[in-house]
Image: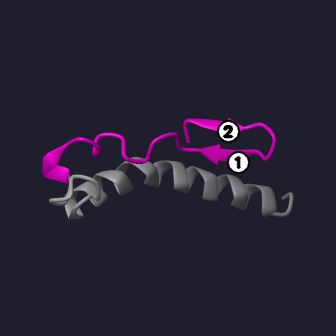
Amino acid sequence: MRSRTDRHSAALYQFFLEGVAGRRSLNLGDGIHPNAAGVKRIVDGILPAVVRELDRLKARRSPAG
């Protein structure tokens, strides 16, 4: 998560194609859609933010102990 929208307290991952867009080796022949290596790069980039958000939501739903 790089920032959070104030109105909805939602995580914002600004550009999921970071490091993939414009790199031929990470895109299919159409130059637009990521290939398997590109998808892996996307997942590697966004997964930590997803895990943090899930942990945050889990903590909010846990009863006070």
- Dot 1: element: strand
* Residue 9 drawn in magenta: yes
Residues 35 and 64: in front is: 35
Residue drawn at (55%, 36%) of the image? 2
Q: Is residue 55 above or below residue 12?
A: below
Q: Residue furthest right?
A: 64
Q: Where on the picture, by quarter, is residue 35?
A: bottom left
Label 1: few (<14), some or many (≥20) within 10 Å? few
Q: Is residue 58 left or right of residue 62?
A: left
Gap between marks 1 and 2 measured at Cα? 5 Å
Q: What label sits on residue 10 in the rendered view?
A: 1
- Dot 2: element: strand
Q: Which residue is mark 2?
A: 4
Identify the image quadrant of the N terminus: top right
Q: Where on the picture, by quarter, is residue 59?
A: bottom right
Identify the image quadrant of the C terminus: bottom right
**What amino acid is labelled 2 in the image?**
Arg
Q: Where on the picture, by quarter, is residue 19?
A: top left
Q: Is residue 60 left or right of residue 17?
A: right
Q: Is residue 25 above or below residue 7?
A: below
Task: Report x, y in % for residue 18.
Answer: 36, 41
* Residue 64 drawn in magenta: no
Stretch of the chain drawn in magenta: 1-26
Magenta span: predominant SS is loop
Residue drawn at (37%, 46%) of the image? 17
Residue drawn at (62%, 53%) of the image? 53
**What amino acid is labelled 1 in the image?**
Ala
CB contact under 8 Å: marks 1 and 2: yes
Task: Report x, y in % for residue 12.
Answer: 60, 43
The tag earlier along the polypeptide, 1 or 2, is: 2
Residue drawn at (15%, 47%) of the image? 24
